Amino acid sequence: MPEVSAWYQDVVSGSLFEVVAIDEASGTIEYQLVDGEVGEYDSATWKQLYLSSAEAPEDWRSPYELNSEDQVYSDQTLITENFSGALSDIEPDLMDLGDDFQIL
């Protein structure tokens, strides 16, 4: 019987995958290949596979993680330390919104 979070290698095809879920009610085993592709076996097919237990590969999370270059240029806002550029000298125009509104 498969175990969730266990890694297996299909001896015939050589594919390496992790069991990510087991649905006992429907008799299915969901798996995820190293490249991120997700699939499903029914219990009858699972029993026909030639599988061996395997260790998780070292880079198995790499399709889902940011590399070092992506981490540097993430969604962080870059703020310069010197605000004395040409745009900082521009004064906003006074806005006349009529008698009912005044901007102080």
Image: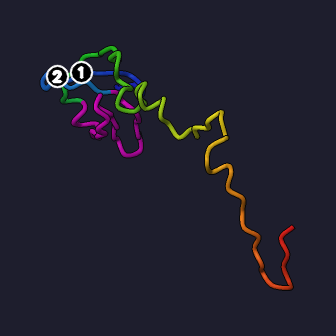
Residue at 67% in and 40% down: 83
Q: CA distance from mark 2 to mark 1?
A: 6 Å
Answer whether labels 2 and 1 touch (C-beta < 8 Å).
yes
The percent coordinates of residue 98 (x first, y second) are: 80, 84
Which region of the structure is painted magenta? 18-46
In the picture, the quarter occupied by the C terminus is bottom right
Residue at 38% in and 22% down: 6
Q: Secondary structure at mark 1?
A: strand
Indicate the quadrant where residue 22 lies: top left
The percent coordinates of residue 80 (x first, y second) are: 61, 36
Residue reaching furthest to the bottom: 99
- For badge 1, the amino acid type reads Gln
The percent coordinates of residue 101 (x first, y second) are: 84, 79
Q: Secondary structure at mark 2?
A: loop
The percent coordinates of residue 78 (x first, y second) are: 57, 37
Indicate the quadrant where residue 43 lies: top left
Task: Name the one closer to the observer, 18 or 29.
Answer: 18
- Asked whether 20 falls inside the magenta stretch, the response is yes
Sequence-first disc among 2 and 1: 1
Is 89 on the left-hand or right-hand side of 50?
A: right
Residue at 29% in and 38% down: 37
- For badge 2, the amino acid type reads Gly
- Per the rendering, the mark at residue 23 is none
Residue at 29% in and 16% down: 53
Indicate the quadrant where residue 102 lies: bottom right
Is 18 on the left-hand or right-hand side of 94?
A: left
Label 1, on which residue? 9
In the picture, the quarter occupied by the N terminus is top left
Q: Is residue 1 above or below residue 94?
A: above
Label 2, on which residue? 14
- Asked whether 41 falls inside the magenta stretch, the response is yes
